[in-house]
Image: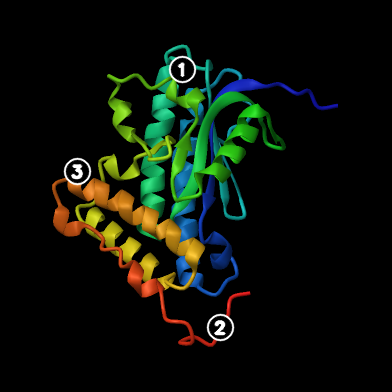
Amino acid sequence: MTTVRLHRQVCAFIDVLGGARLFKGKDRHRAGEFFSCLETFEQRMNGWSRHFPRKRQTRAMVKTFSDNIFVAFPLRSNRQLSDEQVVALFLGELTDQITQLTLLSGFPMRGAVTVGPLMFSEKFLFGPALVEAVELEKAALFPRILLSKSVLQYIEPDSLYHSLVLRDADGYAFLYYLGRKIHFPSSLEWHRQFVQNGLAENASRVRERQKYEWLAQYHNFHAMKAGAPDQRVVIDRATAFKPYGDDTAIAA
């Protein structure tokens, strides 16, 4: 009989938007790029496992299934790291990897980060922290990684990692991945093109286009903050509307 042992951990549940279409196998080159970035993500996050020797239930810090990613760091398992430092380390590394996956693979991501009891073993993934992360991911709606109240309590206003957080209009706090130090100079221009392509490709797909419209607002916020107004994305909502009768398709 398996013994259930819950340990307090900081964890993230992430949904790769558009991944389901990718997994149909129509674009093998893009799929290869995605899995290459995902492999780097796993190697980077799992590489931290040696820093958490006590109460560690698994050597892996990451589990991937379909187009979902789950990652966790245990708290109170390293005498040299406080819980605040572990959460800050987790958010910093997670932000870097999300930046790489988004910019290099071109996939927006939605998810949530929580802190709470969790059983994370080679065979089992169980606990309130997972439940909260999955439920909060559904509330995210847009391509953003929400932070629960249980996470925000570890981020002090004077912390260097305070700059990793933005507050959205609906009150949710989320990871500010564009605010992280980017590893290649053309990242803002590339992100602009990524958002513009998403808007154009999803002009007739209302729900998907809404996600890219949110990304455009997020991108423009960062462009202005970075002093690069010329890199803003123009959101032309008029292109999404046509007079009745111009299309043969009729909405049910």
Label 1 – label 3 distance at C-alpha: 31 Å
Q: Is residue 71 left or right of residue 57?
A: left
Question: Mark 2 or mark 3, which is nearer to you?
Answer: 2
Answer above or below: position of 71 versus 200: above
State which tag comes first along the sequence, 2 or 3.
3
State which tag comes first along the sequence, 2 or 1.
1
Q: Which residue is mark 2?
A: 249
Q: Which residue is mark 1?
A: 83
Residue 183: % across, % down = 26, 47
Write the residue at 38% across / 22% down.
Answer: 155
Classify mark 3: residues with Cα within 10 Å, few (<14), some (14-19) or many (20+).
few
Write the residue at 41% across / 74% down.
Answer: 241
Residue reaching furthest to the front: 244
Of residues 204 and 126, the one drawn nearer to the viewer in this rendering: 204
Q: Which residue is mark 3?
A: 225
Residue 213: % across, % down = 37, 58
